[in-house]
Amino acid sequence: MSQHASEDLSGLSETDRRAVRFARRFDLRNIIGLVFAVYGVVLLVLGALNGEQDREQAAGISINLWTGAPMLVVAVAFFLWAWRSPRPVSELVPGHGEPSPRVE
Amino acid sequence: MRTAADLRLDMGAVDYGMLLFYFVVVLGIGLIARRQVRTSLDFLLSGRSMPAWMTGLAFVSANLGATEILGMAANGAEYGIGTMHYYWIGAVPAMVFLGLVMMPFYYGSKVRSVPEYMRRRFGPGAHVANAIAFSVSSLLIAGINLYAMSLVIEALLGWPSWFAILVSAVFVLAYITLGGLSSAIYTEVLQFFVIAAGLIPLTVVGLKAVGGWDGLQEKVAAGVGEGHLHTWQGTGIGDVTNPIGADWLGLVLGLGFVVSFGYWTTNFAEVQRALSARNMSAARRTPLIAAFPKLFIPFVIIIPGMIAVVTVQGLGSAGGPTYNDAIPALIGEYLPTGVLGVAVTGLLAAFMAGMAANVSSFNTVFTYDLWQDYVKPGMPDGYYLKVGRAITVVGVLIGVSTAFIAAGFSNIMNYMQALFSFFNAPVFAVFLLGLLFKRITPKAGLWSYLVGLAVPVTIYVLYTADVLHFQSALAETMWGSIWSFVSVVVVAVLVSAFTRPKPERELGGLVQGVGTIDVAGDHVAGDTAWYRSPALLGAVALVLCVVLYLPFL
């Protein structure tokens, strides 16, 4: 898939190519993935350290573990999605492959 | 008995760290989005390049601010499961209507804002009136969001409210001025997931603590009454026994038709998210994709409210915490360090996103509809980009000062509903008429709109002066909206009868049945897939509206 993504870029100027690479690296899905990965790891560590306290406060549920693990799964899902289907060039470079938006 | 001071959360260093990390990420989003801003259209409408899943989630998040989360949980505590009406006959059908019926006109005519549609359909008079009214209402509502947020931050974290107002205003200012609407949309999507990661564990733990759904039903029936467990029972006309105090006709017409359709289909802070989509298909799917989370969000807002009413002692009684404290009180009670940090971050993120949505729609209307159309037309685009950035700063400053107006109202939810009845009902009525009937004239558009603005304001003034009487403040706003709608229809028909309509060739793509709108011309690969069909998405959402009611009749 990443090979396909680089093929897209051949017809672009150097500036546009850099803009596309930048936009794909900092795709919103990667940012959401990052936030959820960090939070997920923090929650798992806390859950492992103070399991007893957690259960006492949260009606007997190890809520940090039970929230942290799904958050990590969500993080991985977002990373995979961004990697498998990068945003198309036409969305990232104005005027590429379609008439540029009308400006009155 | 818990008092306000008891709401103070036991935030650990880790929780503050998570909050801080989120703030840093959001500033980073502002910097990233800034790289993509080259024109005023990039800044004010994200260059019309957003995929539907992003605009759809941003559409939900823009409305998921402080007042929505705290207010709907409060309603859940006060009125019970009947609060679901706000979602299942209120928001979702209106969102489906926007996507299926109205969006082709908005997106197809390439207008950049809701007031601009007004200009194309009715000419400059109605346009100026609508642009000014929208600007004023956005800034007043931004102030309400700021104030509501500062109240919660003060209670939860102990920061003085003026400090909380300033910190969040500066923060919103920073990321919107950097990246414009893209910053706002990216942040709204991120916030959607973070608030979900906070509210879902809260609901799960809360339900476990009261003995599951069965336990909650027993406790609610015993504690506050069986009526809180039903949505439609006791809504017969003349036989109203449900906690909300409205019959089914009032719910469907008042809450469903006038209030919700008015808000969701013409409020530019919402519609703007769809206008930033990459093509017609994505724009139409924006509110339809949003409808699905909207169907299920009440489960993690209203149910916690109901849990709070049976677990938080004295909730809603004199001297105890108010209904608005339902979610913060539950968070403090059940969430340990870690999840606590996620939940608090989600709440603060939601509060800021609500404010950012108001500011990012205000700056677009001001720049395009007032400055470019009337004050300084014909300047190069770079000039309007600068105006857009500058007016963002001014908008935030005015928002801070209107926060202090909001502070003067004892019940901010009622203040907000009153504003909605002033501003949304007349626009919706004028739009619906203009969209359906080509015979409605420009003069009719202007005068019916002005009368439609004046009527609910007059009713509100007479109500506060004790001349008119309603069962509750909520009933006042509902009737204010309904009378506004009726007066628009009457005035528009009368004025149209005596004035000349716009020639038909100027109305192509703006009125039902005049000209055609190409809804498939700008399709991109994959847009013809069955799961992207707007009609199918809309139909499934409506069916779910009915099905979800079944367990709670």
Image: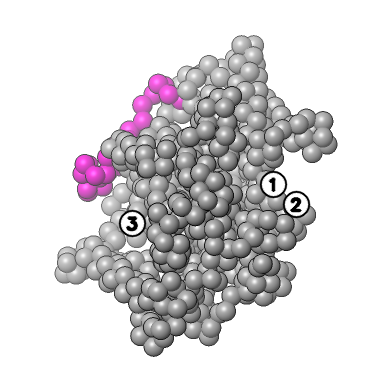
Q: Main secondary structure of the magenta part?
A: loop
> Which residue is outermost to the top?
B498
> Which residue is outermost to the front?
B222
The total number of labels drawn is 3
Other-residue count near label 1 (Cα within 10 Å), few / some / many at <14 / 14–19 / ≥20: some
Q: Is residue A22 left or right of residue B370?
A: left
Q: Which residue is drawn at the image coordinates 49% and 19% (left, top)?
A: B437
Q: Quadrant of the C terminus of chain B?
A: top left
The chain identifier of the residue carrying mark 2 reads B
Q: Which residue is drawn at the image coordinates 45% and 62% (left, top)?
A: B210
Disc 3 to disc 2, C-alpha distance: 45 Å
Q: Identify the secondary structure beneath mark 1.
A: helix
The residue that label 2 is drawn on is: B409
User: Are dots 2 and 1 in contact, CB under 8 Å?
Assistant: yes
The residue that label 3 is drawn on is: A91
Q: Which residue is drawn at the image coordinates 31% and 74% (left, top)?
A: A69
Q: Where are the magenta residues, as a range? A: B511-533
Which three-letter amino acid code belongs to the residue tagged 3?
Answer: Glu
Q: Which residue is drawn at the image coordinates 57% and 34% (left, top)?
A: B241
Q: Is residue B107 left or right of residue B281?
A: right
Front residue of this view, candidates B378 and B54: B54
